[in-house]
Structure formats: structure tokens, C-alpha cells
Image (spheres, coloured by chain):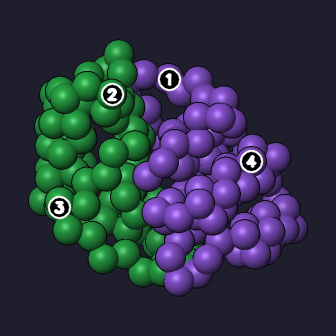
Chain colours: A purple, B green
Amino acid sequence: MLVLITYDVNTETKAGKTRLRKVAKECMNYGHRVQNSVFECYMDNAKALEVKHILEKIIDKDHDSLRFYYLGNRYENKVEHIGVKPSFKLDDVLIL
Amino acid sequence: MLVLITYDVNTETKAGKTRLRKVAKECMNYGHRVQNSVFECYMDNAKALEVKHILEKIIDKDHDSLRFYYLGNRYENKVEHIGVKPSFKLDDVLIL
């Protein structure tokens, strides 16, 4: 299924910047980056639980947030892109 | 239906910052902000076309991107949130 992961990490502190980098790095192990803080992951339920568990441990729940959108297996017509195509490197973990 | 709008606007220039602000402001007319660059909009097809058309005219397609995710009407179990709840003002249009 397609799982969309979006995140906001508060980067006002050095610790926040580190969390942001870690979240992005971890997401890269599971899917591909389509925007700065948006990853699309094609995975089964077990993998989805796994990445959720990992990301939950990285973020500071008082300052950051994660959202998961489960788009199922028939996602071809559920996604639309307009504009520039992404070309991110990990070091493009940008400060929100 | 639930339509998720995510965007990346390149804010390296003053014009980019203006575009970012305009995109966020426009999205606020159609849905609610759940993360910095993520809006959830409950709308019909006509409204979805409308907001897409408006946002397309605001962004610079060589530097920015929009993504639309169509989650249908049965979206209750398709969305999961972890961490801090959003409380954005328009002036929180943050620089990516």
C-alpha cells in the first residue's frame, strides 16, 4: 500500500535540527522523498508499523508532529503533482 | 471527500517568500492546516479543481511544487497523527 508520511520538526534548537535530520534519514530507508517534509512509502502493514515506531522514538512529541496517510493499494489516481520534480539529497534537510 | 494539499515553495528569493505566503493564505480558504506545508480540505470535485487552478497560478512551476492526494469520503481510518497538535497563524508561514 501507499503510505504518505509528513512531518513537522521544530528546529529552533540544535536538538531539533538533529531530530529533523534523523527523521528524514529514516524515512529515506522506507520510501522516496517527494517534497521537503513529505515521503511516499510503498510498504505493507508490518513495515508501516515499523517505521512509525522508529519515527515516534526520534521526535519530541511536545514540539514535533508526524502524520501518516494510508492510501491503500489503488493509489494511481489518488496522487497529482504540479510543478518542479523533487531532487533532494539528505543534506537538503531544510530548516522549517 | 478529503483532499490533502502539500507544497514546497522555493523561498530563496523575495518573490518565493511572497508565493509561499500566498499559497498558504489560499489554502486556508479551503481547508485547515495540519502541518507547516500540509493542508487537509474537505471538498467536492468542483472545489478541488478550483483550488488547484488558483494554486497553479500562484506557484512558479520551475521552482515550486504542489501535490494533491485524494483520500475519498471514507478517510477516518486513513489518517494518523502523532505528536504536537498544530496551532498555526498565517504569519507562521515559515521559510523552507
* Residue under numbered circle 3: B90
* Residue under numbered circle 4: A25
Left or right of A77 on screen, residue B58: left
Left or right of B37 on screen, residue A44: right
Residue type beneath disc 2: Glu
Residue B73 position in % (x across, y down):
40, 68
Is there CB contact under 8 Å for labels 3 and 4?
no
Residue at disc 3, secondary structure = helix
Q: Image height check: is B57 above or below A36?
A: above
Going from N to C along the chain, the mark reached first, 4 or 1, is 4
Is there CB contact under 8 Å for labels 4 and 1?
no
Q: Rounded to the nearest whole Å, what is the CA distance between mark 2 and mark 4?
A: 24 Å
Dot 1: within a 10 Å radius of its alpha carbon, few (fewer than 14), some, or many (20 or more) residues? Answer: some
Q: Nearer the viewer, mark 3 or mark 2?
A: 2
Q: Is residue A53 visible?
A: yes
Q: Image height check: is A94 above or below A10?
A: above
Left or right of A74 on screen, residue A44: right
* Residue under numbered circle 2: B12
